[in-house]
Image (cartoon, rainbow, N blue to C red):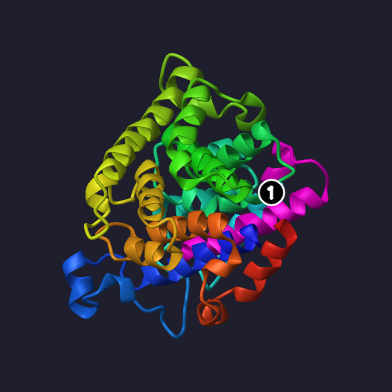
Amino acid sequence: MGKATGALLGLAIGDALGRETEFQAVEEITARHPDWRRLPLPKKALVTDDTQMTLALARGLRTALARGPLTPLRLERPVREEFVDWWRSPQNNRAPGMTCLRSCQRLSRPEYRWQQASDVGSKGCGANMRVAPVGLIRELDARGLSGAAQLQSALTHGHPTALAASDLTAYAVRRLAEGIAPAALPAALRSYALAGRHRYDGFWLGDLADRWYGPSPQDVIARGWDDCLKVLDRLDAALASPDVEADPCLATGGGWVAEEAFGTGLLCFLLLPDDPVAAVRRAAVSSGDSDSLACLTGAFAGAHHGESAWPADWVERIEHRDELLEFGALWD
């Protein structure tokens, strides 16, 4: 079925669709494309920083795994290098997020430990929009998946909500690739969030919590999980009275912050679980952070359906196609 390939192609396809509609009101988009179900993929299907950073993370993960079982130091070194290379690249001209730019600039300086480079005040969606590769690595156990998802987030976005949303996004990708029924996914995610609500994994995060403000690391990270649980409440309410024609951002948020990007990307998939192309189009025709929303929707839909979800001519046109297929083959 090529679940990893499907997820990676899906996130890039969603990203390219959303690139055309980002920063526009729904009325502006529909003035040019009256039927959201027919939103075209551009002939030159260029991606944004979402896919660029996903591939940077994927390269770092591949290097780390080639050196042995994943550990914090083994993960941090190559991913840090890849993030800095992205920051320095002349191709980094796709409206990148300010948190990623600032944090990667600090990561480029060897005197900074990664915990010092992290922006602990930012819960932007720039960390969970790139985390899908972590969920696709089958050899990671539950603690490794959670730790790797949170650490890759914390390299740039060290806010507890960014960590929790990245963890939850990677877990959703994993469960969908494993074959969970879409209708059963929200309850599984809620159970996962509740189980990890007070867990601060010092093995993976080190002393990051020393830069947080609160009674204890466990209390602070619980606030991040609580943000995610609130968006799951909004997701459940939207699915109880589904309206596929409405702007999904009205239900679960615009996606500029991590928990809303997770919730709205997931909502678009769950509104149209049997029609992955319509799902990414629904996410792209929205009032929020359209490229990141459609990127996440595409990752969820592709992990569920596999590579056959996507039209062959779309796959042929997507930027970075060969590298996406290479990683898909590696993790399938």
Quarter of the view holding residue 143: top right
Closest to the observer: 200 or 3?
Answer: 3
Q: Is residue 256 left or right of residue 102?
A: left
Residue 306 counted in the magenta span: no
Closest to the observer: 125 or 119?
Answer: 125
The location of residue 65, given as percent across then percent down, is 77, 49
In the displayed structure, 256 sits above or below 27; it is: above
Note whether residue 181 is visible: yes
Classified by dominant secondary structure, the portion drawn in magenta counts as: helix
Q: Residues within 10 Å of mark 1 (few under 14, many from 20)?
A: many
Circle 1: element type: loop
How many marks are shown on the rendered structure? 1
Note whether residue 119 is visible: no
Farthest residue toward the top? 215
The location of residue 244, given as percent across then percent down, is 27, 57
Quarter of the view holding residue 329: bottom right
Q: Is residue 213 left or right of residue 72?
A: left
Q: Is residue 322 left or right of residue 289?
A: right
Residue ID at (71%, 46%): 138
Quadrant (top left, top right, bottom left, bottom right) of the C terminus: bottom right
Q: Is residue 47 left or right of residue 74?
A: left
Residue 58 counted in the magenta span: yes
The kind of residue on which mark 1 rests is Ile
Closest to the observer: 180 or 327?
Answer: 180
Residue ID at (74%, 43%): 139
Q: Which residues are magenta?
A: 48-76
Closest to the observer: 194 or 115?
Answer: 194
Which residue does the numbered mark 1 point to in the structure image?
137
